[in-house]
Amino acid sequence: MDAKLAALLAPLQKPDLAEADYQLALNQLADEVLRSRKIGRSYQGQFPAPLYQDLYDNLRNQVLRNLTLECDRLRDRPYNLNGTLPIPENLSWDEWATRQRFKAARAILTDECLSQLAQTAQQYPSGDSLRQYALSELVQALRLVKQADTTAAHAPDTLNRTLSYVCEKIEQYDPKRGPVIAWVNYHLKLTPGLIQQEQQDKVIQSSRRKLFRTRLMLKRLMQSASLETLLSWLYLYLKKLINQILVTYGLIPLTFFHRLSHLYSLDRSAVETFLFDLAAAVIHTSPKISFAEPETAPLENISTPNTHNTLSDEIRQYLETDPDQILQKHIQGCRRATFQTIALARLNGQRWSDLAAEFNIAVPTLSSFYERTLKQIAPRIKEYIQI
């Protein structure tokens, strides 16, 4: 049994536990389950609208109901020889908690709830941080709903592009014309054709590669704008060793990018989006071409620590954005097992055995597919990261 799961369930195993103590232990378990929730998250420590407070409350209440049933069911089963309750399928804590969150979320994410999330997002002005928060809540809810839809499997790039479209065109959603999920499903059917059209358009592909290269250069400039460099420029200016023109074209832009680097440590997604827009402005990208990608579109509001732009970071960026649209090849019989998914998992330190269990595919098959595909696309990755 997973050690953390066993420790959290231990107080609930006592047959003579007082009701108050039982409820306390149950609530503590629910809080741990909800710690990594995808919906019902707060914004700067609070809920900006009653809808989001209700969403969290409903999710928590559903988790408590499910946990109560789960614990009662386990208590009726025979104890293990070591005196502990048996855990179904010997799941790890993360797997068990994820399953509990998913069951609860799917129960409360009705068409009415999704409609309210979409209409609330429409109320915030474009570019506002609250709008990004609202869109994040909506998109995460839609992801959970689509994950539960066993009748249709969609490639990751198709779903990401569709949800990006939902964020960009949220104003077009009209609740009188049908539920949100019907709107999403309609565009899910259209998106593969649009992606194929882009892949065949050499102008679009050339512009896409140029855009991502320019953004990478801007990101490198931002991360090289150290305080030491700024002080060196300032020292030269004060000593009258450089003139005002050089200050204008050197120190001021460097100061701007240094400030941007600081903001990057606070809100990575916002700075990535800004760099994306700045790159588009620099190369005068045609507005008819949509370059929204999972990393730059307002899909998730995730805070990550500031890191230097190492080679690993650049490779990760390529894998996440798939600028050449060549990473969606998948293992036959399992559309979820794309090269993009496998490569990112390996980059994050996941073991082959874990991936094999997740996709129900043998390790040799996974590793062979990975190595074979990597050899094919390695030149494209190398071209991308070399400016």
Image (tube, rainbow, N blue to C red):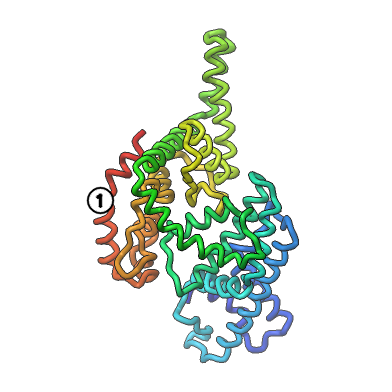
Residue that appears at 59% across and 12% down: 238
- The quadrant holding residue 352 is bottom left
Q: Residue at x 45, y 74 (%)?
A: 151
Number of marks in the rendered image: 1
In the image, residue 256 above or below residue 24:
above
Up-down: is 89 above or below 369?
A: below
Quadrant in the picture for residue 11: bottom right
Question: What amino acid type should be assigned to the residue bearing mark 1?
Answer: Gln
Q: Nearer the viewer, residue 161 or 330?
A: 161
Q: Residues within 10 Å of mark 1 (few under 14, many from 20)?
A: few
Residue 195 locus on image (x, y percent): 40, 53
Q: Is residue 3 visible?
A: no
Task: Please name whichever residue, 324 or 216, is drawn nearer the observer in this view of the structure.
Answer: 324
Identity of the residue drawn at 47% across and 88% down: 81
Q: Is residue 344 left or right of residue 367?
A: right
Question: Which residue is at the far top?
Answer: 240
Relative image position of residue 25 (x, y in whole percent)? 66, 76
Q: Which quarter of the image is occupied by the C terminus?
A: top left
Q: Is residue 62 left or right of residue 144?
A: right
Q: Is residue 379 above or below residue 196?
A: above
Residue 262 lies, in percent from the top left, at: 58, 36
Q: Secondary structure at mark 1?
A: helix
Residue topped by disc 1:
376
Residue 277 visible in the current orientation: yes
Residue 172 in the figure: left or right of residue 339: right
